[in-house]
Structures are given as C-alpha cells and as structure tokens.
Amino acid sequence: MKVLIVGSGGREHAIAYAVAKSPRAEKIYCAPGNGGIGQLAECVDIGAMEFERLAAFAQEHAIDFTIVGMDDPLVGGIVDVFEKRGLKVFGPRKNAAILEGSKAFSKDLMKKYGIPTAGYENFTDADKALEYLNTAKYPIVLKADGLALGKGVLICNTLEEAQAGVRSIMQEKQFGSAGNRMVIEEFMTGREVSVLSFVDGKTIRTMTSAQDHKRAKDGDQGLNTGGMGTFSPSPFYTEEVDAFCQKYIYQPTVDAMAAEGRPFTGIIFFGLMLTEEGPRVLEYNARFGDPEAQVVLPRMKNDLLEVMEACVEGTLDKIELQFEDNAAVCVVLASEGYPVSYEKGFEIKGLSAFEEAEGYYCFHAGTKKCPDGRILTNGGRVLGITAKGADLKEARANAYQAAQWVEFENKYMRQDIGKAIDEAT
C-alpha cells in the first residue's frame, strides 16, 4: 500500500512510525512532514490545509490510503474533499469533526443524550457572558468554542480573572475566531485521564489510557500548551471506571453522533475527569492527541493500518485491540519561552543515540532538515522523547535519561512529567 499522512508534528511522526511497522506499507508520504518524519517517509511540500492539492497528489501518486493527523484539516472538511474524488481516507467528515471543532456543539450533544459532563452555558455576546459571571460559582472554566491549539481554556479563580478572560477571548480575540462563541463551564476536580478510541460510525474500540501535562511549568504552573509530556497507562483508570465509561460515555457518544446524522469515523479522543461523582467528559477531540499518541502507539500490538482500514470499511467489530503490558512516558523538549515567544533555527545534536536504543523513541514535532543533513529546531515543541519501562517509574527514569542524549540551544523541559503518579504508585 501507498500511504499518505497529513500533518507535521510529533503525533504524525508517531503515526508514521506505527504505519512503517506494517508489512502492508510499501511507501509512505507525509505532507508537509518534518525533519524526523523524513527518515520514515518521503516529505511532500504541501500544507495540511491545501485540500485540493493534497487530493490531487493522492490521485497522481496512486495513494491507497490517506491518514489525516491534524485537527484543522479535519474540521475544515478535508475528508469530504478526498471522498468526493473516490479516495480512501481515515478521519471524520466535516459534519462529524464538529465534535472537536465546536465545544458548544459537543456540550449540547452531551446534554441532549445524557452523557455525563460539567454544567455549562454557551455565549455569543460578551456582555451577557460578563453578566452571567456575577452569579457564577468559582473557580470557573472559560473555553473558546473553536480550535485554539489546545490553549483556548482558562481556569479562573475569581470574578476579576473571569471578566479578564471573557474580554481576552471574546473581545480582544486572543484565539481569533475560535472566541466568537464561548462556553462557561463549572470547574470539576479529580484526576484527568485521556482515552483514545477507534470508531467506524457504529462500533468503538478504546485504546490504553494516558494522561497529558498541559501547563508549561513544573507543578502544573504557567500557561496552557499543546502538551509538555504524557504517560500511559493511567493507574487511576481502573476496570470499574472503564466499565462505566463504556456504558455511559463511549458508545453513547458514537450512537449520539449517528442519531444526529453525523456518523463518526476515525479517532475520538475522550478527555475525562474522574470526579467524586464518577467520570465526566472534559472534552472531545476528533483525532489522536499529541503527545498522547507518542505513548499509546508504541505500546500498541495491532497493525495500525489494519485497524484504520477496518474503521473506514465499517468492520471494526472484527478487531480486538491489544497493548503491551508495560508503561511509556514522553517528555517534550521545547524551545525556551514556549508557548509565548521563542527562537528557532538551532542545530539539534545527539539524535543518533536513538537509532540503536530499543524501547526509546524520539518523535520530531518542530524540526527542519537542512540540505546538508543537519536537523534544526523549527517550533515551540521540538521533540517528544518517549521511553518504555516495566512500570511508570522505570519508564519515567528512562525517558528523562534519554532526554539528556539530545542537546540544542534554548532547550527546555518540565522535570516532573509523571512524577506525582510515580510517587503515588
């Protein structure tokens, strides 16, 4: 099979790694790709939002299967464009990708179908949102309705913070048009867990659990980012929690989307909060999480292409997912100053250490390959350093050891990825 992967981050590198293991993958392309993906695939200089060019490339190169990794093209309707040309593509159509594309839509869906989530109100008028805050209970959560690179969520402890947040999101448009509408949501407490799943429109198969660290600094301080590290599995995601979620969250979400005339095919990412009252949905994503994919896919035993094809063909009920009985931890190496401002263009050294190291992975997120072969930093999140271990403690120690193998100017990482879990277990 000839496979095209659309995207350029650590998630797409992890997907390319998993696809490359498949005996069915004869040739892999990635558009636009990055410095690391280029070691597994032929990178193509077409942007992820250039749908017609991508579809034309797929036709011209007789691509058998396209995998869309990123949220923006999915929400923008890339799958519809490919399907109109008769191309086989993995991901939800535009009318289903709205599950991630609009937080207001997903909250209304959960309310309508009785899927457990936090109480909320939707607003399109900043003045009405500000008025509502006067009677709200604090802390409170503000969410830009649209896509905001994982950064459009503000947790506000006081009325003053919330008022500033509404002004920032809705009036000053800190997150652009994503802030034209806003969700104000009750603050939930508990353990956060991420569960990724494959869906074929009617059947759902959940993957092993994971947990992301969103804040930029140690101790979950600083600004929200696209993810500073993650681990898998979560020791708090028990069989009892799984049974509840399968019955009241996972299958009901798939059934709700089908009932709305929006059958979902692809990946549904369930962001969960394990509250004292039981699991609640924090958010949905319509694709692999990044960096969650970087700890989940290396532990997956199945042939990724086979599972994705089953989703597209509606035969997922014949697949049973299998994962290794171990753990994985990913530590993100970022550019100092991320997510606000940072310099790029620095040479990365030490990457060759991963070539012979079994159970260690270096997934490129923001890198660029020079004509002379050097790899340079080219983004805020530069690399995802992932390592496996018998348990989370060993995996964490291995990941931080491997993080020292790599050097570049302005290198920054959190020092506490998975630390609290390591200590708790």
Image (cartoon, helix red, strand yellow):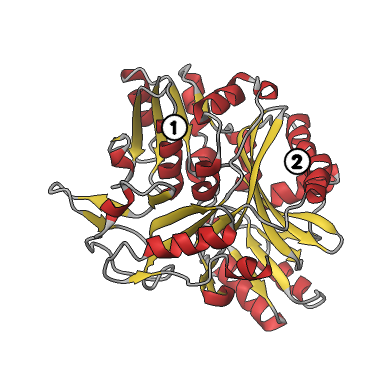
Local packing at callout 2 (Cα closer than 10 Å; few below 14, some 14-19, many 20+) is many
Secondary structure at numbered mark 2: helix
Secondary structure at numbered mark 1: helix
Residue 340: x and y in percent read 42, 71
In percent of the image, x 47 and y 71: which residue is there?
414
Kindly identify the amino acid type of the residue bearing the numbered disc 2. Tyr
Quarter of the C terminus within the rendering: bottom right
Residue closer to the observer: 292 or 325: 325
In percent of the image, x 72 and y 68: which residue is there?
129
Which residue is the site of mark 1? Answer: 19
Between marks 2 and 1, how big is the CA–CA gap?
26 Å
Which circle's residue, 2 or 1, is located before the other in the chain? 1
In percent of the image, x 42 and y 31: which residue is there?
21
| Residue that extends furthest to the left in the rendered view of this protein | 372
Relative placement, left or right, of 114 versus 181 is right
Kindly identify the amino acid type of the residue bearing the numbered disc 1. Val
Q: Is residue 133 visible?
A: yes
Residue 132: x and y in percent read 78, 71
In percent of the image, x 60 and y 19: which residue is there?
313
Q: Which mark is on residue 176?
A: none
Question: Total marks drawn?
Answer: 2
> Vertical placement of 394 versus 420: above or below?
above
Residue 78: x and y in percent read 48, 33
Residue 373: x and y in percent read 17, 48
Which residue is the site of mark 2? Answer: 250
| Residue that extends furthest to the front in the rendered view of this protein | 390
Q: Nearer the viewer, mark 2 or mark 1?
A: 1
Residue closer to the observer: 54 or 217: 217
State yes or no: discs 2 and 1 in contact (Cβ < 8 Å).
Answer: no
Relative placement, left or right, of 151 versus 360 is right
Q: Is residue 51 visible?
A: no
Quarter of the N terminus within the rendering: top left
